[in-house]
Image (spheres, rainbow, N blue to C red):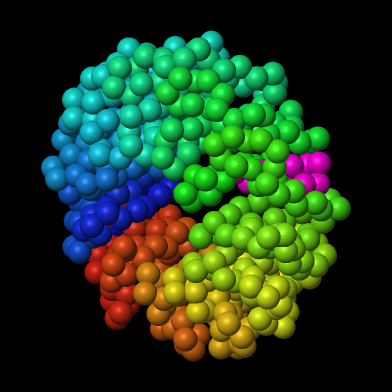
Amino acid sequence: MKHDAKVTSAQFSPDGKRIVTGTANPDNTLSTARVWNAETGTPVFGPMKHDGDAYPPQVSPDGKRILTVCADNTARMWSADNGKPLARPMKHAESIRSAQFSPDGNRIMTASWDKTARMWDAATGKPLTGPMKHELAVYSAELSRDGKWILTVSGVNNGHVWQVWNADTGQALSAPIKHDRAIRSAHFSPDAKLILVALDGGTARAWSAETGKPVTEPMKHDGSVMSACFSGDGERIVTASLDGTARVWEGKSGRDPMLKMTHDDVVFFARFSPDGKRVLTTTGRGAARVWDLDSDSASEIQMPQEGEIHSPQFNPDGRRVVMVWLEKDTVRVWDVETGKPLTEPIRHKLVHAAEFSPDGKRMVTTADDSVRVWDAETGRALTEPIKYDSWIRSAKFSPDGKRIVTISGRSTRVLEAETGKRLADLIGDDSARFSLDGKRIATSSSDGVRVWDAETSKLLAGPIKHA
């Protein structure tokens, strides 16, 4: 799949049958997107051209349309079957900062520096509502999961505004809620009934998405709130703050915290486990703790370390935690039930990332010049360090967990996950992705996009290149 310009993105359609690529010329004065048949590498349609730098093209939820957004202040819709424009360009007066499909794919939501957000008909490109006007630039617009509401955030560094709108009419549901400090995060609750806003000023609060009125008391900290999120069922909220605490609050009232988790350092990160029964916190100096929320008196399971923590995460069933300590070049897995380490420190020189396999049974760690596969339950190395001649950019499991695809230097390598055996070297130094069914791998590099059979490593198509 050969291109005449640098390939900036490549992704499969949801069904894995097509690939959409984006390119930009060296001075970013012309950007294009194109769709290709993933089996044959032949172009399905395109190129779709924009003046100026473009954001990566998006595929609609049903895989039938392509949305392109560009710095020329337009968003455009194209047929994934024949490459013909499906709608007139959706234009803003200034740069579009975000664009997304509605969950059903029938609408498009855009936010722009022209101080407006707009909802468009994805089939015609016609506005479904009038412009949702703001006093300042709009830098995010989020649709609720049920597609009924829109949450916008606008403003400048020293003050932000959020507002909720009716997605069908474009009418504001309430007056804009103004803050004299920056909004760190603003998101819908899982059921889309509440908005949770975290501020630099030391508070988080949940608001009614329908009325814009506060639902909870201010959840106060003595320092900026760095993050705030709901549990998966929406019943609780956890906040993390520079005041050295993370706090769990009742999601519907926000009254005195149900639990105050005190640290001797600023807290940057706090997240619920998948089942909502625990909270993982990390601090600025590299301490990480897992807190049990179901016990009568919450038990603290402390995992002392030194140095910056990278990639903290629960495994899929929430029973284990893996973290990377950059300064110590170590990875370790902990049992969150007992607080005991399941492994000795897994030492991998210059380690910078660790990832569970989809089933949580293995881990792959990435260092500057090697990758290694480990048993996630025991910490036993399943492979020797697999050496590379240059810095490793990424290592990802296939959907079935049987293979790992890595990018290093100017090539992509496929490994057997169980043994680390080298299965194939593929052409591609920019990105590499498995299709959703794991049967193909798409790689991209400066000379085009290629599609490979993931089992045999046979080249199926490419290089696909934009005209």
Name the outermost residue toward the front: 296
The quarter of the rendered structure image containing the C terminus is: top left
Q: In the rendering, at what x and y percent does residue 340 appear?
A: 71, 77
> Is residue 199 shown in magenta?
no
**Front-most of residues 231 and 98:** 231
Which residue appears at 59% of the width and 71% of the height? 320
Residue 141, quarter of picture? top left
Q: In the rendering, at what x and y percent does residue 399 appear?
A: 37, 69
Q: In the rendering, at what x and y percent does residue 98 appear?
A: 44, 31
| Residue 123 seen anywhere in this rendered image of the structure | yes
Q: Which residues are magenta?
A: 237-246
Q: Answer with left or right where residue 251 lies relative to residue 88.
A: right
**Front-most of residues 198 and 95:** 198
Residue 285, quarter of picture? bottom right
**Front-most of residues 92 and 194:** 194
Which residue appears at 13% of the width and 42% of the height? 82
